[in-house]
Image: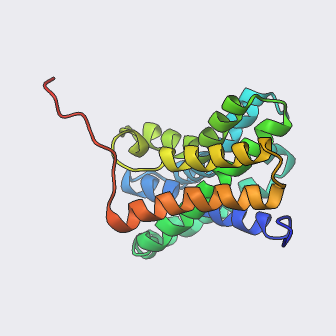
Amino acid sequence: MIPLEPILPVIDVVGMVAFAVSGALAAARKRMDIVGMIMLAAVTGLGGGTLRDVLLGRLPLFWLRAPELLAITSIVAVLVFFGAPRFAMKTRLLLWADALGMALYAVLGAEIALLAGADAWAACLMGVVTATFGGIARDVICNEVPLILHREIYALAALAGAGLFILLRLHGVWREPAFLSGMALAFAIRALAIQRGWSLPAYRGRD
């Protein structure tokens, strides 16, 4: 089995950059200045892991231990500020990068929670939080209904991936195959939703 350690940081940065770009583009749509764009990119890219660490009591926060992560989201925001139209044209590519990042963060968040001593259900929840909270915070700051609450199959994919990883680990499956299986399931669900336009049914009753 190929070890995960050499490639995890690369996938992690890809996912974080995708989230940061989505935050910066949201700031561009709201006509924010460059400071607002930098802040929103950081919130989107780092928000999920930040809430996870706070809930688990893992201090100092991960991006305080690795300040280069904040530098990366800031650089992304500056690049988007001067080239937002070009980034907007790559929406499809960003969707796939975002899906990859979501799948990684869902499983990684669950693993971090397990290592911190969380129960299985709490670890599964931390996986979903890590994968989704940045986007929720982005939409709330932009005064919009969070996307995952009304249209996209996103949190469900993260939940499935985190849940499978935890289930396999609790049954003694080695880390690498369990990690890759969880990631694959989360990414596959999200990929099918993107390709086929799947969405969860919305409430259509009377007010």
Q: Residue furthest left?
A: 206
**Relative to residue 124, is residue 190 depicted above or below?**
below
Q: Position of residue 57 (x, y in %)?
A: 80, 27
Residue located at (34% from left, 45% from top): 200
Q: Is residue 20 visible?
A: no
Which residue is found at the position 47% from the left and 49% from the top? 154
Horizontal side, residue 164 vs residue 37: left or right = right
Report x, y in % for residue 147: 39, 45
Q: Residue furthest top?
A: 207
Q: Quadrant of the N terminus?
A: bottom right
Direction from residue 199 to residue 95 in the image, left or right: right
Residue found at the far front of this picture = 171
The C terminus sits in image quarter: top left
Q: Residue 75: percent from the left, percent from the top?
A: 65, 64
Which of these two is toward me, 192 or 47?
192
**Relative vertical location of residue 92 with respect to residue 161 in this rendering, above or below:** below
- Is residue 173 visible from the viewing direction of this image? yes
x and y percentages locating residue 160 in the rendered image: 56, 47
Please name the residue shown 45% across and 52% down the image: 27
Residue 196 vs residue 9, the one in the foreground? 196
**Foreground of the two, 97 or 166:** 166
Q: Is residue 78 left or right of residue 197?
A: right
State the image quarter where residue 47 is shown: top right
Asked if residue 176 is positioned above or below residue 79 in the image, the reply reads: above
The residue shown at (51%, 68%) is 96
